[in-house]
Amino acid sequence: MSDWVVRGGAVLSGTVSVQGSKNAALPILAATLLAEEPIRLLNCPVIRDAENMLKILRSLGCTVRREGDDLIVDSRTASDFVLPTALSGELRSSIFLLGSVLSRFSEADAPYPGGCEIGNRPIDLHLEGLRRLNAVIEERGGRIRCRGGRLRGAVVDLDYPSVGATENIMLAACRAEGRTTVRNAACEPEIVDLQNFLRACGFRVHGAGMPTVVIDGVEQGHGATYRVMPDRIAAGTYMIGAAITGGDVTVTGMQPDAVDTLLYKLSACGCEVTKTADSVRVRARGRARGVAFTETRPYPGFPTDLQPQLFSLLSVADGNSVLVENVFENRFRHAQELKRMDAKNRILDRTAIITGVERLHGAEVIAHDLRGGAALVLAGLSAEGETVIRHAERIERGYERMDSVIGRLGGSVIRKEDGIDQEEKTQ
């Protein structure tokens, strides 16, 4: 278990280059199984979730190594179709391997995936999509067993535009016989990035970013060098950091259009927002204003992965705000932790009613999940005194050295692991 101590009162200012995208890297790593030739990935984030995915790939027989900042995955040596229980239980995105393992080996054996406890995230859409591609699936004893022979293309109509199901079906369909059409597909930028990677490997995929994605199966892909897209959620987190601390932060190396809904909210809060082709500058202008209504939706709506961070900002904004969480029903666990810091909010089912206070106060809080933990870091930076965040290792699932990034921007986050102050450890 890792604790972080966040010292409040600092103003975040400066420039930060955003990391590679967690939500793009994980399905791309799963897709490396399809190529059967070495893949070189650039800008793959060094985060816990990615490292867990690499451990799973190694357990299947893949060779993984780093050369400087590059990551090389060679799946020619892969030979196992059984996903390990312990590793998969820690990583929700292990489910992406179901489609690629099934496609590669004509069978797959996987445990139910783990990850943050932010509500029910049923994999029914994943499994039904694979069944449409002619997979035979048996669920028994906490595991999912799939057999397929060579999968066959089909029309898959998703009841909900699930990001994971869309990506999993794309992976399974790449080497299936014939054409697969995914309708009501999710449109997130990370799905476009997966398509671009698959195309770089010789697979025939088009339509990603739109509600219909078409995949024409091929026998085998080839190796490639590919740069993972920048992380729009990490970028948005540091922008909100500028707003909540009264600071001035420029995030570079990003795709500004991918966070337009957040930029609109930051402008409504009173921030000055400036966009270029690959950067965004957010400059606070005094205390933020409350925002009457925000609801999370699938892309291009406001992202659920930025809801907790916006919640922290609205907790110190002037006025009342309403946040509605439409994606995950249990994604307000940070609300009670913020109350420990003297925030004022009420939760009614999936709706949060927030009354902004002038100042939060440092307290001991718990990071129940990845994005909620990031929200508590932001709250701690704006608070009076010190905030101790328990189980902060969950933040490292998706943020690459968040403590160091905040330090470069003028904030202070100190790691404590097993009671040892990491600042003291390095002296």
Image (tube, helix red, strand yellow):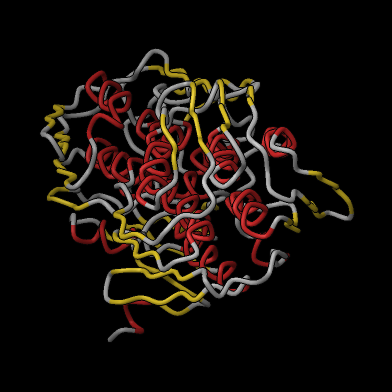
Q: Residue at x 58, y 41 (%)?
A: 173
Q: Position of residue 425 (x, y in %)?
A: 36, 84
Q: Position of residue 87 (x, y in %)?
A: 64, 66
Residue 392 seen in the current view: no
Furthest-top residue in this view: 292
Residue nearer the viewer, 322 or 287: 322
Q: Position of residue 413 (x, y in %)?
A: 33, 61
Q: Position of residue 50 (x, y in %)?
A: 47, 61
Left or right: residue 415 compared with residue 364: left
Quarter holding the C terminus?
A: bottom left
Q: Residue at x 54, y 72 (%)?
A: 62
Residue 109 in the image: above or below residue 153: below
Q: Looking at the image, how many numbered discs can be counted on the residues?
A: 0
Residue 94 in the image: above or below residue 255: below
Left or right: residue 363 compared with residue 110: left
Residue 98 seen in the current view: yes
- The picture quadrant where one finds residue 289 is top left
Left or right: residue 286 compared with residue 354: left
Residue 91 in the image: above or below residue 128: below
Q: Residue at x 33, y 20 (%)?
A: 290
Quarter holding the N terminus?
A: bottom right
Left or right: residue 38 compared with residue 253: right
Q: Residue at x 40, y 31 (%)?
A: 315
Residue nearer the viewer, 353 or 115: 115
